[in-house]
Image (cartoon, helix red, strand yellow):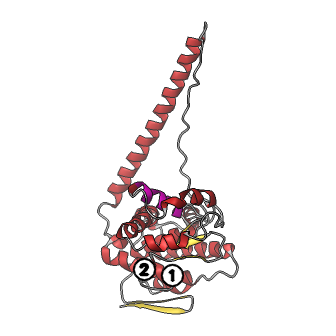
Amino acid sequence: MRRTGILLLAAAPIAVAAVVYGLGAGSSGSSDAKDKHISAVQRERQDAKSRAESERARDEEAIADAPPGLAAPAKKELAQRIVASAENSTLDWRGSYGYIEDIGDGRGYTAGIIGFCTGTHDLLTLVERYTKARPGNGLAPYLPALRKVDGTGSHQGLDPGFTAAWKAEAKLPAFRAAQEEERDRVYFDPAVRLAKLDGLGTLGQFVYYDAMVFHGPGTGRDGFYGLRERALRKAGSPSRGGGERAYLDVFLDVRREAMRRRSSTIDTTRVDTAQRRFLREGNLELRTPLTWQVYGETYRVP
């Protein structure tokens, strides 16, 4: 995944009381105060958790009757094919489980069906979760090195064996399933859910998903959530009374600007001659047949 930042979810602070030996006069009151402070923090954390669960429940209720959109099996398959055309120059996204190379973007190795990167935390998370489920797998020995290079473009501790280990592991159904699960957990499901809450149809859900893949689920200026924030300031989403086509047009403008900030020579055709084309044609439900271009190549899905 070629992204600009990592979304860090801040947890409420946890107060830890120090162990005090030889308590004298007045120490009991100090201990009571600490206990009260710990209890207050615990209550705050529980309240925050309850609010989050309540908000999620309201969100789920709000989209419960919405059409499946991009989550419908045929549309989800289509989405993976369109993303693969931009990420791996192919429509055969299942042929990319074993893909791995350093594409020279400063993010280390890019690998797998969604472009997990050794330098952007998502590849590390994938291998950690996979190893928890299947200890002793062929990638587990590289976890210490993956933790050290996380956030950098370094290969230290990974060469020369990591790429071969990735390709070998990618032949196993369990690791293929792990890649799909991580793709859905981090990118697909959150993007589709938020797009539905914003009142967007199938095309809008894909626009969010592809942006999440490329820019990452970051809150910074050029992370997905930062892009959405800026777009919402310029145009209201349908759920806020705005027009769907107008809002998506603005979102794609904001996204293209972010891509160009990364590099003035970056290829933006995944926006210009793919998503923008679908939008210009008024294909808000991402109906097939579809024709689009990425990097000068033409793709068709009947």
Closer to the N terminus: mark 2 or mark 1? 1
Residue displayed at 55% across by 22% down: 34
Residue under label 1: 88
Relative horizontal placement of residue 65, taking residue 114 as reference (left or right)? left
Pinpoint residue 184: horizontal percent, then vertical percent: 41, 65
Badge 2: residue crowd in 10 Å (few <14, some 14–19, many ≥20): many
In which quarter of the view is residue 75 placed? Answer: bottom left
Q: Amino acid at mark 1?
A: Asn
- Position of the N terminus, as image quadrant, is bottom right
Q: Residue furthest top?
A: 25
Residue 112 showing in the rendered view:
no
In which quarter of the view is residue 259 placed? Answer: bottom right
Above or below: residue 180 compared with residue 85: above
Quote the CA–CA distance across marks 2 and 1: 8 Å
Residue 226 showing in the rendered view:
yes
Q: Amino acid at mark 2?
A: Trp
Pinpoint residue 278: horizontal percent, then vertical percent: 46, 84
In reply to whether residue 125 is colored magenta, the answer given is yes
Q: From the image, give the main secondary structure of the stretch colored magenta.
A: helix
In reply to whether residue 26 is colored magenta, the answer given is no
Is there CB contact under 8 Å for labels 2 and 1?
A: yes
Above or below: residue 88 compared with residue 109: below
Residue under label 2: 93
Residue displayed at 40% across by 67% down: 175
| Residue stretch in magenta | 122-132
Pinpoint residue 26: horizontal percent, then vertical percent: 60, 9
Along the viewing direction, whichever of 102 and 184 lies nearer the viewer: 102
Residue displayed at 69% across by 76% down: 263
Above or below: residue 287 compared with residue 47: below
